[in-house]
Amino acid sequence: MKYLLVLAVIAVGYAFWRGQRTGAPPSKGKRPPLPAPQDMVACARCGVHLPRSEALAHGSRTYCCAEHQQQDAR
Ligand SMILES: [Zn+2]
């Protein structure tokens, strides 16, 4: 009878352990896919880094906003 109790505790413990192990991967797998990496450029005026798609280009120089583009043009 004593062994039956030990076996039951081990069985419950094992089931709980398996439940936790199988429960973790799905939540990790549901993460949204990372966006594709983008080229980063620095503003020629203030040096802040931003994606190339959001930067304002003026010749070979890039700017974070129109204000900095105008300030650097002077
Ligand atoms: Zn700037």
Image (cartoon, rainbow, N blue to C red):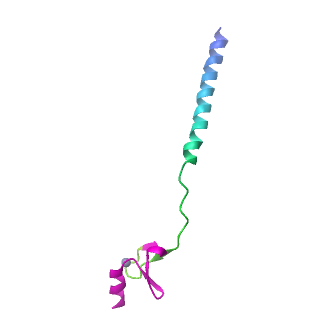
- 14 relative to 32 in the view: left or right: right
User: As displayed, is residue 51 above or below residue 71?
Assistant: above
Q: Nearer the viewer, residue 24 or 53?
A: 53
The quarter of the picture where residue 63 lies is bottom left
User: As displayed, is residue 8 above or below residue 24?
Assistant: above
User: As displayed, is residue 27 above or below residue 70?
Assistant: above
The residue depicted at 59 percent of the width and 43 percent of the height is 25
In the rendered image, the quadrant that contains the N terminus is top right
Q: Write down the region rendered in magenta.
A: 49-74
In the rendered image, the quadrant that contains the C terminus is bottom left
Residue farthest toward the bottom in the current orientation of the protein: 74
Q: Which quarter of the rendered image does ligand 1 occupy?
A: bottom left
- 14 relative to 73 in the view: left or right: right
User: As displayed, is residue 55 above or below residue 73?
Assistant: above
Q: Position of residue 8 (x, y in %)?
A: 63, 17
Q: Nearer the viewer, residue 33 or 10?
A: 33
- 66 relative to 52 in the view: left or right: left
